[in-house]
Image (tube, rainbow, N blue to C red):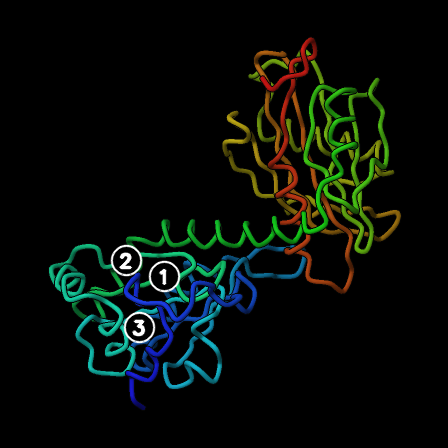
C-alpha cells in the first residue's frame, strides 16, 4: 500500500488542509481506534487496556473507555482519519507502515526530538475532523514507546476524558436548558444546576432540605439535600454512607446502598473538598437496583452540608452512559448569596 495515498486531504499537524471546514467526526468519543502494527500490538495491548478500559460496576461490568486496534491498511475503508478518538502509536524509526505513516506526518525536527527521548507523547484536537482527539505516542523502540505510554497515561486519560465529557455535554444540552427551572432553584433554594430539557422537578421538600430532579426512559434522578449545623469532623466515609441510606430510605421507600458495593474517594467539587460515593443501590421490597454516585461536602460560608446524589434504574440497558450524563449535570451545581442572588 502506498503510504503517500493516505496523506491526501489530511492535515499534517498544521502543514496542509483540503478545505477550510473539517468533516464531522465519526464514532463514539469513548471508543479509541489505535493505529498500531500487529507485532507492536503484542506489547501495547495490555497497557492500553489497563490505562483506558477502567471497569465500573452498574451492577454489570461496563468499561469507561473502549480500545480497538486499527490498521493503516484500512485507513480509508474504515474512515480512521475522521474517528472521534484516534491514537497513532509506533517507534519513530519502525519500518512497518504505521511507522512510515507517523514519520510522514511529523516534521524532521519533531522526529529528532523523539529520537532524543523528548516530547514523544502529544495530543491535538480537530486535526482531521471536527471534535476529534488525536493522540500520538512514540519513542526510539517499542520498549521506550511502552514506557512513554505509562509515564503519560494520566495526561492521555485526562485528555480523552475531556473529549468524552464534551460529547456528553453536547448530547445532554442538545435541546438547550430549562432556564426557568434553573432560575426557580436559585430563587427558592439558594442553589442551582443547569437543568436540561427533559428533566423536571419531581419532588421538593424545602422544610426537609431536599429537591429531586428526574427524567424518564430510562428512570434517572438527581437530588440535592442540605442540612445546617454539620461539623466538618462528622463527614467521614461511614457517616456519608449512612447519610445516603437515611435520605434514600425516606425519599425512595427503602432504597439503600448494597453492603460492600460502594467505593469511597475524595475530589474537588465546585472548589470544595468532597467525599465521593459510587456503587450500587437496591430496594429489596421492589426488587430494583442500579448504579449511583454521590458528592458530600460542607460549604463553610453557609455552615451548610450538601449531599448531591444521582442514580438510575434501567434494566437491560447499558447504564454507564446515563449515569455520566447526570453526573455532568451535577457538575453545574452553584451556590448563591441568598440576599443578592449572586454566585458565592
Query: Tag on residue 253?
Result: none
Ranked by sequence position, the earlier of labels 2 and 3 is 3
Question: Along the polypeptide, which appears first: circle 1 or circle 3?
Answer: 3
Residue pictured at 54% horizontal, 69% vertical: 26
Q: CA distance from mark 1 to mark 3?
A: 18 Å
Q: Quick one: label 2, few (<14), some, or many (20+) residues within 10 Å? A: many
Residue that numbered label 2 is attached to: 121
Is residue 252 left or right of 138 when viewed as pictured?
right
Residue 28 appears at what percent x and percent y?
56, 64
The residue under label 1 is 135
Q: Residues within 10 Å of mark 3 (few under 14, many from 20)?
A: some
Write down the residue under mark 3: 43
Question: Would residue 101 be found to the left or right of residue 209 on screen?
Answer: left
Give the Cα separation between the discs numbered 2 and 3. Answer: 17 Å
Q: Give me the residue at 85% from left, 24% from top.
A: 205
For residue 309, above or below residue 290: above
Q: Quadrant of residue 115?
A: bottom left
Would you say the residues marked 2 and 3 are in contact, meaning their CB atoms lie under 8 Å apart?
A: no
Disc 2 and disc 1 in contact, CB within 8 angstroms: yes
Is 153 in front, or is 329? Answer: 329
Q: N-terminal of the two: label 2 or label 1?
A: 2
Q: Dot 1: few (<14), some (14–19), or many (≥20) neighbours within 10 Å?
A: many
Amino acid at each position: 500500500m502506498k503510504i503517500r495515498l493516505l496523506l491526501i486531504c489530511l492535515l499534517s499537524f498544521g502543514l496542509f488542509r483540503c478545505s477550510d471546514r473539517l468533516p464531522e467526526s465519526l464514532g463514539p468519543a469513548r471508543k479509541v481506534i489505535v493505529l498500531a502494527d500487529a507485532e507492536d500490538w503484542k506489547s501495547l495491548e495490555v497497557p492500553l487496556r489497563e490505562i483506558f478500559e477502567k471497569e465500573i460496576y452498574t451492577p454489570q461490568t461496563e468499561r469507561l473507555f473502549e480500545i480497538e486496534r486499527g490498521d493503516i491498511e484500512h485507513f480509508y475503508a474504515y474512515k480512521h482519519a475522521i474517528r472521534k478518538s484516534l491514537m497513532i502509536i509506533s517507534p519513530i524509526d519502525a519500518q512497518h507502515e504505521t511507522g512510515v505513516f507517523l514519520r510522514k506526518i511529523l516534521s524532521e525536527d519533531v522526529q529528532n526530538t523523539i529520537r532524543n527521548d523528548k516530547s514523544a507523547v502529544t495530543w491535538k484536537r480537530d486535526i482531521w475532523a471536527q471534535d476529534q482527539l488525536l493522540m500520538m505516542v512514540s519513542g526510539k523502540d517499542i520498549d521506550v514507546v511502552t514506557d512513554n505510554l505509562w509515564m503519560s497515561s494520566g495526561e492521555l486519560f485526562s485528555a480523552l476524558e475531556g473529549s468524552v465529557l464534551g460529547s456528553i455535554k453536547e448530547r445532554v444540552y442538545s435541546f438547550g436548558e430549562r432556564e426557568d427551572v434553573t432560575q426557580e432553584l436559585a430563587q427558592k433554594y439558594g442553589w442551582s444546576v443547569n437543568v436540561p430539557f427533559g428533566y423536571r422537578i419531581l419532588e421538593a421538600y424545602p422544610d426537609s432540605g431536599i429537591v429531586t430532579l428526574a427524567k424518564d426512559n430510562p428512570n434517572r434522578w438527581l437530588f440535592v439535600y442540605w442540612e445546617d449545623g454539620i461539623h466538618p469532623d462528622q463527614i467521614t466515609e461511614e457517616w456519608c454512607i449512612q447519610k445516603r441510606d437515611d435520605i434514600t430510605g425516606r425519599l425512595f421507600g427503602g432504597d439503600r446502598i448494597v453492603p460492600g458495593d460502594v467505593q469511597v474517594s475524595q475530589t474537588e467539587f465546585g472548589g470544595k473538598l468532597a467525599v465521593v460515593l459510587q456503587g450500587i443501590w437496591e430496594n429489596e421490597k421492589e426488587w430494583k437496583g442500579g448504579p449511583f454516585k454521590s458528592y458530600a461536602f460542607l460549604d463553610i460560608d453557609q455552615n451548610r452540608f450538601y449531599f448531591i446524589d444521582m442514580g438510575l434504574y434501567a434494566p437491560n440497558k447499558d447504564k454507564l452512559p446515563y449515569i455520566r450524563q447526570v453526573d455532568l449535570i451535577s457538575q453545574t451545581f452553584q451556590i448563591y448569596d441568598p440576599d443578592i442572588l449572586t454566585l458565592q
